[in-house]
Image (cartoon, rainbow, N blue to C red):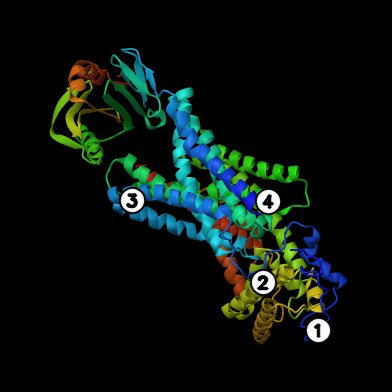
Amino acid sequence: MTSGAVPEDGAEPTRKITKRVGARRPLSHDGRHRAGIAERPPVAPPPAASGPAVQLRMPAVWMVAVLVAIGAWRIGLIFADAVRLYPRASAIAFVLFAAYAVPFIWVVREVDWLEREPFVLLATAFCWGGLVATAMANIGNTAAQEILAKVFSPSFADRWAPAIVGPTNEETLKALGVVAIVLLAKRHVNSVVDGFVYGALVGLGFQVVEDFVYSINSVVLAGDGDTVMPVVATFLVRGFLGGLWSHTLFTALVGAGVGYAVVRTDRPLRIRVGVAVLAYLGAWTLHFVWNSPLLRDGFGIGVGGLIAGLLIKGIPGFVAVLLMLRVARRHEAGYYLGRLNGIEPVLVDPDEMDALVTARGRSAARKRAAAKAGLRADRTVRRLQRAQARLAVEISRSGYPSYWEAARNPNPRTPALERCVREILLARQRLVALGIPVASRYGREQRTPLGGWSCALAITGLLVPGASVIALILVGIGTVAARRQRISPDNRLGMASSIGILATALWTVVYLLHGFSGG
Amino acid sequence: MLRPNLYGSLAVLAVVAAIAIGLPTIDDALPAGRSLRAGERLDVGLGVSVAAPADAVLDVTKTQPSLYRLVFSVRSVRVVVEASRYAGDLPGLSEKLRRKIQSNPGYQASQQEHPTSTVTGVSGLAGSYSTPGRNGTYAVFGHHGVGVEISMAGDGSDLRKEGTDLTAMIRSVRFGAS
């Protein structure tokens, strides 16, 4: 697990050099790419790809298995009751919230793009959130709420229990899910981003199962039998108005803190524990604010006020966590892409490395290729980027600080590393045939008045109904115009598109709910 | 390697147990009832209130002001009073409550209903139902867009013994300014 030039077994790397593909001495200008932040140590080298992710002799395996079995039994009883009493509503709720999880999983996988986590650990994190945390929170929350009602009053418990009990029990139980992953396979938590990814999946599991239970509760409360409308209303409220800044986000923050505590062994223990505790408190506070009765009356000005209240409660935490994630991802990208220092441009061009650092950069490079040579080029650039990322991870696994060292000292070069090189060369060959020698993000750019206007209108659309629709139309016009001119679209169009879709979805939900409640 | 893992796993188990076993144990150790004075007016929500019958004990754990729900008991009889915004007519409100009652396994509402009214003159409908091993009665009232549903169930003997007080409680329902 060392990152020096000497292999783990201590043997001097042999000088046997066969065919060196892509080894060149690092040039001074290589530092211009953003991977220059690489040499800070925010990431531990990932473990070898071979071998099981989890060892059965670990006590944690049995602890997790027992708790998941108990959770599955309890949640299974709730699901079975729901299906028996309300089969139609249960089926719709199941389908809606299962589908709802898909985009979240896609985003988490995108965050986890560079060094992918083993499926078995991701699934365990999801199961912990969906089975263990929900089942235990179900018991603990009821008890804690009743204790508050007994010690204070029913009114106090009714008003404040969700804000006090929810964060305390739920964030603790979900945080334990990330701790369980560390106990199961600490070597697979090798960056803050990894902690974020595991935390997000624990939170997502919790969110999906909890939303299903809430849907069925709303059917029971409505008292109209096996009807679907309460399920749809719950889906709109909990899925859209509260879904972005909910359990997935909270636990991702906790997971990032745990990841920091695990990875940053260069820092004193008190700092590492302090960061993990701060992350937990941050998630607790976000959860508290979201569940609290504050701003629930929407300033007394109707639907607009309610929406404003929800946005004020949700957006600051959402933005803060995204900014933290951005920094963590850049550190991770910096570490892995720093392993590519000194690489031959035919394998990774410095401009391509610059594009690899961020999701937006990768996307911009694909869009540029697509604008020039169609969807086939888009797919080929995606394949190239994937292979380049795998190469970076394989180099860090090999224990060499960079490709330059790895290629200079093949010991021997691992088959995985050779495979990555072959994949890159194959993708490069195809791209050259398509007239794209370098899959960089730079092209004839791209700043248009439409980009600025669409962004402004999309942001306005969060408060003014209809503005986001105009923003989306402008985004469409801008994208089509760029395609016609065979240039990359203004990057701000992407941001306007995301905000515009969010704002349009929010207002659509508001109108639908307004309709459900009979105006 | 194994020992830290074991200690860590035990620590995780301990925290889970504290939440899933410890909190319910503390909850069970605390009394859930609060005695009410006979005639004490209890707010249900949406401006609705009722007068507590003699020997009534408020269930603080099941009373939920945000859902406009009040739960108390008189001996073995458990009383649930709920208010809601309701724009329909009385038979519709009664039908809604009957459906809710009958959605519980083994609960059966009788077909016969009779008119009733509060002491302030708001008219309502009342009926009876049976649950496994217990008998129950219900009543609904509607006034100015607010509906009130009252259901109570308990031993037949207690229902008969407390019948007068419980009927008085039903008739004591007050709607805001009514």
Of badges 2 and 1, the one in the foreground is: 1
- Quick one: label 3 or label 2, which is nearer the N terminus? 3
Residue holding disc 1: A17
Where residue A271 appears, x then y in whole percent? Answer: 75, 44
Q: Give the spatial CA distance, label 3 vs label 1.
A: 64 Å
Say few, some or many: other residues with alpha carbon within 10 Å of mark 2 (under 14 / 14 to 19 / 20 or more): many
Q: Quadrant of the C terminus of chain A?
A: top left
Q: Which dot, 3 or 2, sits closer to the camera?
A: 3
The tag earlier along the polypeptide, 3 or 1, is 1
Element under disc 4: helix
Secondary structure at badge 1 equals loop
Residue A284 in the image, given as x and y percentages of width and height:
59, 40
Residue that appears at 34% across and 55% down: A91
The x, y position of residue A75, in whole percent, is 41, 48
> In the rendered image, which quarter is residue A191 located in?
bottom right
Which residue is at a point 72% across and 59% down the rendered structure image? A44
Q: Left or right of A504: which side holds B49? A: left
Residue A186 lies in what quarter of the image? bottom right
| Labels 4 and 1: the sequence-earlier one | 1
**Which image quadrant: the N terminus of chain A?**
bottom right
Amino acid type, callout 4:
Met
Residue that badge 3 annotates: A80
What is the chain letter for disc 3? A
Q: Position of residue A241 (x, y in %)?
A: 49, 47
Which kind of residue does numbered mark 2 sit on?
A: Arg
The chain containing the residue under callout 2 comes to: A
Residue A324 tag number? 4
Q: Which numbered dot is residue A390?
A: 2
Rounded to the nearest angstrom, the CA distance separating label 4 from label 2 is 24 Å
Q: Chain of mark 1?
A: A
Query: Which residue is most to the right?
Result: A28
